[in-house]
Amino acid sequence: MNKAKSIATPDGQSVQLDPVLDAMIESMIVIDERGTMEQVNKATKRMFGYEPEELLGKNINMLMINTDHDRHDNYLYNYQQTGKKRIIGRGREVQALRKDGTVFPAEIAVGEVKTRDYVRFVGLVRDMTQQRESEEQALKQREEMVNVSRLGMMGEMAAAMAHELNQPLTAIANYASASIRLLDQSKDNITDVREVLQEIVDQAHRAGEVIQRTREFTRSGDEIRTVTSIASIAAPVRSLAELDAKANNIRLSWNIPTDLPEVEADPVQIQQIILNLIRNAVDAMHDTEPGQRDIEIRAKLTGPHEIRFDVKDHGHGVSGTAATDIFNAFFTTKSSGMGMGLAICRTIIRSHGGELGFRNNDVVTDGTGATFYFTIPTRS
């Protein structure tokens, strides 16, 4: 049976380090009140690349980058002076430093061992490299799914967009033909030709705006969060939503106050949620009487630090069987749907600290249909 290793304290006491700790995959380091390393286990060698004799008697801050080792020394000093446990009994993340100079993310938890008049600290260090890489990969995959969903949404709206682009392009062709006729009739029609050419410029700008809005909405790349208002986020998506609504003979009413508190969000991702909810509302009203084809879009403060965004339709509502699965991936009530839209929307809004939900309308007060909503926290 192996004997337990121990470290001696100046007052003759001993702190034992059981050999079983050498089998631990995490690094374990015993330090004194000044941060001097007195004992390390085998995992410390594997993690940092140092032989034990290269560490013993040295300050533990040699295993951290400058900003973290200065902070660690301050924690120990403040604890000795005030007794306040800033790091004792808690885990925190640091940028650790290997012997070969490579830096890696690590979590360190420090425990306290007291003898009669002497104190030892036991640090447990965990290499977080794989966990951080997995988190980054999961984030990248989520961002790719979000972008694919946006592209799919634009594909579904292709007919409405083609119609919207066709109008200015047709006008441009007609105005150009008119300019040629005016020049053929007389060389003195410069004023008339100038007016027609201005119409061509205006229609070209109109077509360009449609293309630009679509390009911005379908951009790919890393999530970019900014401090902005929900009104500013909703404004660019309004024109895209109007395209789809007009193509389906549906009226949209907007009530987005400009004085709501600011939020910190990725505008394009929130716009994706808004457009997705509006498109679902449009689809839900295919069988609704023409006079009742209205969608209400509104935002309001529902708590001291929360905004709720509602999209209310007058369609068929959500059935009991669909209600339990509607936010699950691959569940859809559409004949050609993939069932990813609402699932991705919920992932996005939860990453922003909010929630996505729905309720069927009160038939007496609101009429038929459903109201889908999301919440998002404010910055104040």
Image (tube, helix red, strand yellow):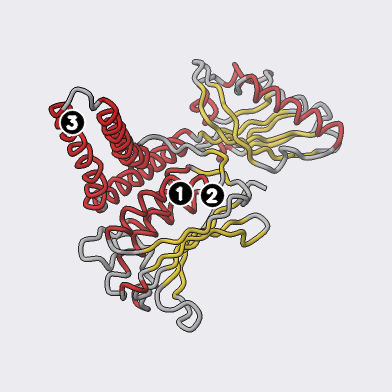
The quadrant where residue 360 appears = bottom left
Residue nearest the viewer, comparing 361 with 131: 361
**Residue at 61% across, 39% down:** 18
**Residue at 39% across, 72% down:** 314
Which residue corresponds to mark 1? 270
Going from N to C along the chain, the mark reached first, 2 or 3, is 3
Q: CA distance from mark 2 to mark 1?
A: 9 Å
Which kind of residue does numbered mark 1 sit on? Ile
User: Which quadrant of the structure image shows residue 372?
Assistant: bottom left
> Pointer 2 and pointer 3: residues touching (CB < 8 Å)?
no
| Mark before the other along the chain sequence, 2 or 1 | 2
| x, y percent for residue 41 | 57, 31
From the image, tell me which residue sits under label 2: 230
Which of the two marks, 2 or 3, is nearer to us in this view? 3
Tag nearer the camera, 1 or 3: 3
Identify the residue under disc 3. Answer: 182
Residue 4 is marked as none
Calculate the distance from the C-alpha at mark 1 to the C-alpha at mark 3.
49 Å
- Residue type at mark 3 is Leu
**Which is closer to the viewer, label 2 or label 1?**
2
Q: Is residue 3 above or below residue 329?
A: above
Type of the residue with mark 2: Ile
Which of 198 and 238 lies nearest the eye of the viewer? 198
> Do the residues bearing badges 2 and 1 touch, measured as CB atoms within 8 Å?
yes
Q: Residue 280, how many percent across, how many down?
A: 34, 62
Estimate the x, y position of residue 105 in percent, counting from the top left. Answer: 53, 31
Percent coordinates x, y for residue 256 in the rendering: 53, 55
